[in-house]
Image (cartoon, helix red, strand yellow):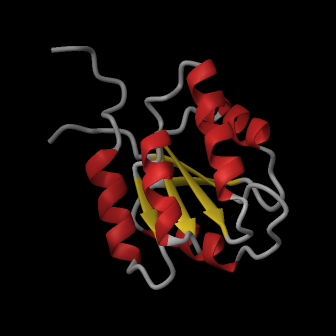
């Protein structure tokens, strides 16, 4: 059996949204599933999130947005990841995202959007199936 490092996930609450219950629930579920989780806390700027993701060498960024500012915050985070040549970090989004906004967010670089009521196992499985392998030299 190959010993692979655990998946590292940064869970972040961008913008002025002050509700973090969902973010804390998903952070705990990911941790309980064997992932290393870094939770940044409330009111993070896109710059803070991308800097933390790069410094922590994460495989995935999970954004939790309930404020309605997703159409401003997410494209900025995607742009910063590209500027830092870190677009290989899987980007997923959770929260109350209207259906009509989802296609544009996915086109911008969001791999998946998980709305309220999504089973935790669905999110865990998606991250496991879509993170890029770490620490492997090209075969």
Does 132 sit left or right of 68 as displayed? left
Determine the residue located farthest toward the bottom in the rendered image. 117
- The answer to whether residue 31 shows anywhere in this view is no
Which residue corresponds to the image point at 59% horizontal and 74% vertical from the top-left? 96
Query: Would you place residue 28 above or below residue 127 in this image?
Result: below
* Displayed quadrant of residue 69: bottom right
Q: Is residue 12 above or below residue 17?
A: above
Q: Residue at x 41, y 76 (%)?
A: 120
Q: Nearer the viewer, residue 84 or 76?
A: 76
How many dots with numbers?
0
Q: Position of residue 35 (x, y in %)?
A: 45, 55
Name the outermost residue toward the front: 100
Q: Is residue 68 visible?
A: yes
Residue 85 x %, y %: 54, 18
Q: Residue at x 26, y 51 (%)?
A: 129
Work out which quarter of the rendered image holds the N terminus and state it: top left
Residue at point 63%, 47% (across, down):
74
Q: Residue furthest top?
A: 138
The quarter holding residue 132 reads: top left
**Can you say which quadrant of the picture contains the C terminus?**
top left
Residue 67 position within the rendered picture, expressed as x and y whole percent measured from the top left: 74, 69
Q: Is residue 70 above or below residue 116?
A: above
Q: Is residue 130 left or right of residue 27?
A: left
Q: Is 69 displayed left or right of 110 in the figure?
A: right
Residue 8 vs residue 60, the one in the foreground: 60
């Amino acid at each position: 059996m190959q010993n692979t490092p655990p998946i590292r996930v940064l869970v972040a609450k961008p913008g002025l949204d002050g509700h973090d219950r969902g973010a804390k629930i998903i952070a705990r579920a990911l941790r309980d599933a064997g992932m290393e989780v870094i939770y940044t806390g409330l009111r993070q700027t896109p710059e803070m999130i991308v800097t933390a993701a790069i410094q922590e060498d994460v495989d995935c960024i999970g954004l939790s947005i309930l404020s309605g500012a997703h159409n401003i915050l997410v494209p900025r985070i995607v742009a910063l990841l590209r500027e830092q040549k870190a677009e290989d970090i899987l980007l997923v989004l959770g929260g109350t995202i209207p259906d009509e906004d989802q296609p544009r967010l996915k086109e911008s670089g969001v791999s998946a959007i998980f709305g309220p009521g999504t089973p935790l196992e669905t999110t865990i499985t998606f991250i496991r199936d879509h993170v890029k392998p770490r620490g492997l030299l090209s075969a």
